[in-house]
Image (cartoon, grey):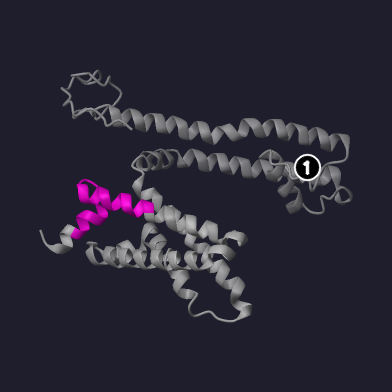
Amino acid sequence: MTFKEKLNEIIFGWETPAGRAFDVVLILAITGSVAAVMLDSVASIRDANGSLLYALEWAFTLAFSVEYVARLYCSPDPRRYAASFLGVVDLLAILPTYAGLFIAGAHYVMVVRVLRLLRVFRILKYMQYVRESESLMRAIHASHRKIVVFLFFLFTLTIVMGSLMYVIEGEEAGFTSIPTSIYWAIVTLTTVGYGDISPQTPLGQALAAAMMIMGYSIIAVPTGIVTVEMSRVAGSDRSPSCPGCFSTTHDNDAKYCKLCGQKIALGPPPEAS
């Protein structure tokens, strides 16, 4: 095995002890860098430990820079990695600190602060270390059509309700336009209730009450859709697939498929989470 292949096994893999150790160290580094960013946003802590936080920021930035270059070097397809979501996140994790070196002047301070907020993107790198995220993504992908239909229904409902409220209340009650009324409908339907706009007439209040009650039931719909798909994914992960009809609906300890009678090759038991 060449040095490049060994490095790829350590950085991108988790099967070997070295790969697992690298992942653990990197997760600790990510946690430390995010904690430093959060502490730096507290004025009292920044005034008392500004130099230390600045040094830590550069230490983490240099470490993540070496990691990013190493990933590009040992990746089978560097361009594909650089253009991937996690590759972009890795790049965003280091760019703001370097950008701060070239932006000077008091009127650029706010721009630098906005750029520094991008370092919080490091926390998104956690996703590649959560093995269960694959099952979650499979469940979301399997239910995305149902969710799209539900969102389209919700979008239509807010337009209808918002338009009705605009007709009922009018500009005197704060419903100055249909888009403003749709905004109120979204806030009410999601049970957020900012209170910046509220109906004044009995009919408008009755419609608002109906939307509030409806909101509680609507919120549970996408949760139920994803939960069902997650149960199916979990079931398919536990049950061995039939080589004949590819069914996964049989019992986990079944030796023969209950649909086609094909013998099932029993694999190793699933890992405990």
Query: For numbered disc 1, what is the local secondary structure?
Result: helix
Which residue shows up at 82% across the image and 35% down it? 205
> Compared with residue 46, is residue 263 higher up or lower down, i.e. above or below?
above
User: Hey, what amino acid is under mark 1?
Assistant: Leu
Q: Which residues are magenta?
A: 7-28
> Compared with residue 95, is residue 9 higher up or lower down, i.e. above or below?
above
Residue at the disc numbered 1: 164
Q: Is residue 23 magenta?
A: yes
Which residue shows up at 48% across the image and 55% down it? 35
Query: Would you say 213 lies left or right of 85 here?
Result: right
State the image coordinates of residue 71 (x, y, percent, origin top left): 28, 63
State the image coordinates of residue 26 (x, y, percent, origin top left): 34, 54
Query: Would you say 96 lies left or right of 178 here?
Result: left
Query: Would you say 90 lies left or right of 12 here?
Result: right
Q: Nearer the viewer, residue 200 or 260?
A: 200
Q: Nearer the viewer, residue 166 or 118?
A: 118
> Compared with residue 168, is residue 247 higher up or lower down, i.e. above or below?
above
Q: Nearer the viewer, residue 249 or 120?
A: 120
On-image quarter of the N terminus: bottom left
State the image coordinates of residue 104 (x, y, percent, origin top left): 55, 81
On-image quarter of the C terminus: top left
State the image coordinates of residue 180 (x, y, percent, origin top left): 75, 52
